[in-house]
Amino acid sequence: MLTWVLAAGAVLCLVYFIAILMYSGMGTAHVLIWLLLACVLGATAWCVRCYHKYPKRLPLRLPVSLVTLCGLGMVVMTVLQILILSRIPQVAESGLEYVIVLGASVKGDEPGKTLRLRLDKAAEYAAQNPETTLILSGGRSENDEVVEAVAMRNYLLEKGVPDDRMVLEVQSLSTVENIAYSRILIENMRMQKKEENHQKDRTLPAYLPFVMGPEHKSTHQIGILTSNFHLYRALQIARKQGMEEVCGIASPSDKMLFFHLCFRDGLAILKERLAGNL
């Protein structure tokens, strides 16, 4: 029974790998994960079968080790997928002061599909919340022809978002840097606003705050807008960096690649945890 389960898993991974290749090609990031998983599950199934047929020729520790490794990996990834999917907000919080739009790959000087979906969501949010400032976060990697943030601004301008409502962050090359550099930008802008407002302020009579009642503030002041599969990791990184007032805004992602993207981000969560970024 165990042999057939492992073999079926190997076949499913191989079929999904071929489906991704046919849909989006070898350029899909980390697509070889599925081929590797197919090989691991196939090798484990072969070891279990050989042990059952020739128990004296194959040491027990080999199939046991492989089965344990596969089982542990499945448990860990299942927990991570639950965390990723359960933290996707159903409704974006309105009235945020700033929304950090995380960059993604560009093709030529145009946003790739993942980034376009994020930008469409950003344009929708900007139209519904005219006081919100968008922080477009993304630098230029070795494979990009243009800076991600610049491509993002050009796309949003075509969508009707005013240029004065967008601030570009052009230094970051990863999610950790996206959030770190954007946080610095927001802190600087807040400080500048505070200095400008301080010059206009005058002292109110002591009784006025009581008459006017308590000031009502939004629960959050900063939003992070990114793909639904990426939101959990982005929020955890932000909170690790001390951004307690942050909330998430999820954009849709490619339906065909959704499982692949979630699995890939689960591996990225493990990596960021080991690196101390979560």
Image (cartoon, rainbow, N blue to C red):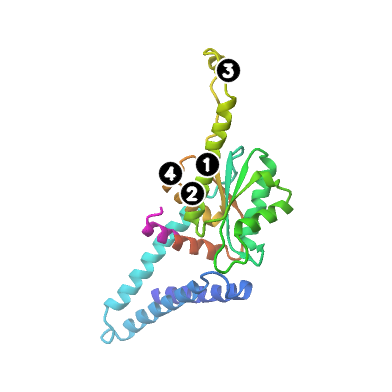
Q: Is tag 4's residue or tag 2's residue first in the polypeptide sequence?
A: 2
| Residue visible at 53% across and 66% down in the picture | 260
Element type where label 3 sits in the image: helix
Q: Is tag 3's residue or tag 4's residue first in the polypeptide sequence?
A: 3
Task: Quadrant for the N terminus, please.
Answer: bottom left
Q: Is tag 3's residue or tag 1's residue first in the polypeptide sequence?
A: 1
Amino acid, disc 2: Leu
In this figure, which residue is indicated by the disc labeled 1?
188
Amino acid, disc 3: Met
In the picture, the disc for residue 242 is: 4
Inspect the magenta stretch and tell me whether residue 89 lies in it. Answer: no
Label tally: 4
Magenta: main secondary structure equals helix
Element type where label 1 sits in the image: helix
Is 95 located above or below residue 62 in the figure?
above
- Say if residue 86 shows up in the picture: no
